[in-house]
Each structure stands twice: as structure tokens, then as C-alpha cells.
């Protein structure tokens, strides 16, 4: 039996006003790429030290409701020996876990991906819950290109997301469902909108089929945005309008919140675009928030440079970026705030 009250209470807390989620769930391969940009070796201790600085930043709880972690981090502790999930909980931040095993080539469908990790998932989720996680995230990847995405790819990924979501709720974890339409390519804003809408229709159909309790879920989508190589780019107001139009058509009102991924947008773009949506002042059925990885962490990594002497500066950079995104939750962000003191 699902505890629906508990699930919806966690989901609502994840999208509390003025707050969003820090996606710090880079797999070992991905964090290595991030560390390469600052010339830092990706050892287990360096990964721990980096997550330690993120998870022990005083004041982050004002703007951050939850943190998504990779398996390794959920088993690690602060310098003082406090498990990360407990350190987060002590400051009122909810711990989350990425239990998927990554996007792999979808056999028979060149250029398309399917996310793996369903085998043994029930047992893994139970262990993650015992380690302190209260929510999870599963990412599906959808590519726009010549003749793709296929309907089959959308359905296969929607099915996996729904299987995962049902297992999460059985375990008492809130599932974040993430069907990411990539920004790679030359597609237009309109094409992104069409594909995103189709992906969301397939996803909510599958969630319904799997009897998932929508009030106890969170959606993590891409924004409706032109591909990086599209010659016609869009301003934040155009992105905001296209994105909200798409969701009004395809995301049920029972879903408590939508937390965007940044997906390759710069930190400033990701903040501006979220702000533009909330500044429209529309009465919407869901909270519009953030669950940024790169757009939150880029300035932190730059300030840190892998050096313990820079931890305080890196934490300042984190607080600053989190605060700006917190303002974007209310539509009160302005470019001048980029320079402001924390
Ligand atoms: P980005 O914000 O860097 O896209 O990462 C968010 C995330 O969790 C992707 O799964």
C-alpha cells in the first residue's frame, strides 16, 4: 500500500516556495569530465571533498529544498564523519538518489537511447531509503534529428520511467521523472515544443497505466528552447511562453511541481528563463522550479579549483547562484543581482 499522504508531503516540500533542487548526482564518468575543466583529479576523496563543500554550505537551505546524489555520495560522510544524507537533513534539505544506470543505445533504433537500471531496482531503492533518501530521479534522453525521435523510443522510455516511478512509490520514495529532450542539434523552438509535448503525453499515459499517484511525483523536463545550432534563437519571454503552453497541454494539474534541468544553458540563461516563466504571473496548477546541475555548479567548480583553501569562496559562489535561482522562483530576478553580494 502506498502512503499517499507521505508521498505528497515530500513532493510538496521539494517544490517549496523560493526553493529548488541541486542536482549533484553526476556519475563517476560525468564528474570526471567536470573536474577535468578545473584540472582536478577525480579521486574518491576529491569527489567526497567536493560534495562535502556543497552539502555543508551554511544558508543553502534558504534556497535549496533537496539534493540529488549519486550512489557513491549517499555512502559518504562529511569531514566530521556525518553521513551526507544526515548532514543535509539536519539543515532541512531532503536527500535524493539517482538509481538509473544511464542512457544506452536503443537496439534497432540508430541515434536513440533507452535508460537502463530496472533490474534489481526494488532492492536498490529499499537500500537507498534505508540510507536516508526520500526521493529519486530517473533520466530518459530524447534526441531530435532526422526522423527521430520515433514513437517507439518515446514509448520505451515512458514505460521505463513509469516502471521506475511505481517502484519508487511502493518504497515510499517520490519519483522525479525526467524525460530530457536534448538541446543538441539545429532544431527550432517549435520542433522542441512538438517533441516535448509528444514525450509528455506518452509519459503521462504510461504513468496512468502503471497506477502512479501523480500528486506524489515531480516532473523534471527540458524547457522548450531552440537547439544549440538553430540559427534562430529565442529570448526568455518566448521560451517561457512556449514552455508553459506545452505543459498546459500535457502535464496534469495533479502534479505538484515542475523542476527544470539546465541541459547546457549557461547559469545566467537558466536563471533568466525560469524567471521569465514565473514573472508572467499566471495562475498555474504546478510550481515552476529548478533542479540544475551544470547551471548551479559551474561557478562553484570555477571558484573551488580543487583547493581546500578555496572552499569558502566556492560556498559563496553556490549561495549566490542559489539565491538568484530562488529569486527566479518568484519572478523577481534581475540582471543587476548578478553582481550583488550574497
Ligand atoms: P543539468 O542541469 O546539468 O542538465 O543536470 C540536471 C540533471 O540532473 C540531468 O539529469
Image: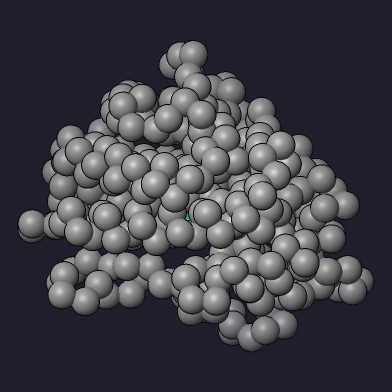
Figure check: 198 above or below 306: above
Residue 40 horizontal/vertical position (percent): 59, 79
266, above or below 282, in the image: below
Residue 220 visible at all = no
Residue 190's image quarter? top left
**In the depicted structure, whether residue 327 falls above or below residue 301:** above
Which quadrant does the C terminus fall into? top right
Q: Nearer the viewer, residue 28 or 127?
A: 127
38 left or right of 158 in image: right
> Going by the picture, which residue comes out furthest to the left?
146
Give the residue furthest to the front.
Answer: 1
Can residue 91 be spotted in the picture?
yes
Residue furthest right as drawn: 80
Give the image location of residue 226, x and y in percent: 23, 42
Q: Is residue 323 left or right of residue 179?
A: right
Q: Nearer the viewer, residue 85 or 130?
A: 130
**Residue 105 point in image, percent of width and height:** 27, 75
**Which residue does the image show at 49% across and 60% down from the upper left?**
164
- Residue at 83%, 69% in the rendered image: 83
**Residue 21: x and y, percent?**
61, 46
Q: Residue at x 28, y 67 (%)?
A: 113
Q: Residue at x 59, y 23 (%)?
A: 330
Amino acid at each position: 500500500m502506498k502512503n499517499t499522504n507521505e508521498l505528497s508531503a515530500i513532493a510538496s516540500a521539494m517544490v517549496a516556495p523560493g526553493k529548488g533542487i541541486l542536482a549533484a548526482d553526476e556519475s563517476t564518468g560525468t564528474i570526471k569530465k567536470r573536474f577535468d575543466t578545473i584540472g582536478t583529479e577525480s579521486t574518491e576523496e576529491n569527489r567526497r571533498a567536493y560534495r562535502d563543500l556543497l552539502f555543508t554550505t551554511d544558508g543553502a537551505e534558504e534556497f535549496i529544498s533537496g539534493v540529488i546524489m549519486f550512489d557513491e555520495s549517499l555512502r559518504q560522510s562529511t569531514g566530521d564523519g556525518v553521513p551526507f544524507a544526515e548532514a543535509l537533513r539536519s539543515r532541512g534539505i531532503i536527500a535524493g538518489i539517482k538509481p538509473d544506470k544511464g542512457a544506452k543505445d536503443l537496439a534497432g533504433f540508430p541515434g536513440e537511447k533507452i535508460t537502463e537500471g530496472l533490474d534489481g531496482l526494488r532492492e536498490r531503492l529499499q537500500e537507498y531509503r534505508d540510507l536516508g533518501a526520500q526521493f529519486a530521479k530517473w533520466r530518459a534522453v530524447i534526441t531530435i534529428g532526422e526522423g527521430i525521435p520515433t514513437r517507439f523510443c518515446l514509448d520505451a522510455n515512458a514505460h521505463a520511467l513509469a516502471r521506475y516511478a511505481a517502484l519508487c512509490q511502493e518504497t515510499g520514495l517520490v519519483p522525479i521523472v525526467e524525460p530530457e529532450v536534448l538541446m543538441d542539434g539545429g532544431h527550432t523552438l517549435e520542433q522542441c515544443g512538438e517533441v516535448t509535448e509528444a514525450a509528455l503525453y506518452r509519459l503521462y499515459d504510461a504513468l496512468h497505466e502503471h497506477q502512479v499517484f501523480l500528486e506524489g511525483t515531480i516532473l523534471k523536463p527540458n524547457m522548450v528552447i531552440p537547439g544549440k545550432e538553430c540559427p534562430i534563437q529565442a529570448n526568455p519571454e518566448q521560451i517561457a511562453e512556449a514552455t508553459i503552453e506545452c505543459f498546459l497541454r500535457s502535464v496534469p494539474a495533479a502534479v505538484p511541481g515542475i523542476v527544470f534541468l539546465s541541459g547546457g544553458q549557461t547559469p545566467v540563461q537558466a536563471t533568466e528563463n525560469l524567471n521569465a516563466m514565473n514573472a508572467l504571473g499566471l495562475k498555474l496548477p504546478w510550481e515552476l522550479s529548478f533542479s540544475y546541475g551544470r547551471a548551479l555548479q559551474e561557478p562553484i567548480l570555477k571558484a573551488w579549483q580543487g583547493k581546500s583553501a578555496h572552499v569558502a569562496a566556492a560556498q559563496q559562489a553556490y549561495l549566490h547562484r542559489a539565491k538568484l535561482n530562488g529569486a527566479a522562483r518568484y519572478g523577481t530576478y534581475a540582471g543587476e543581482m548578478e553582481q550583488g553580494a550574497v
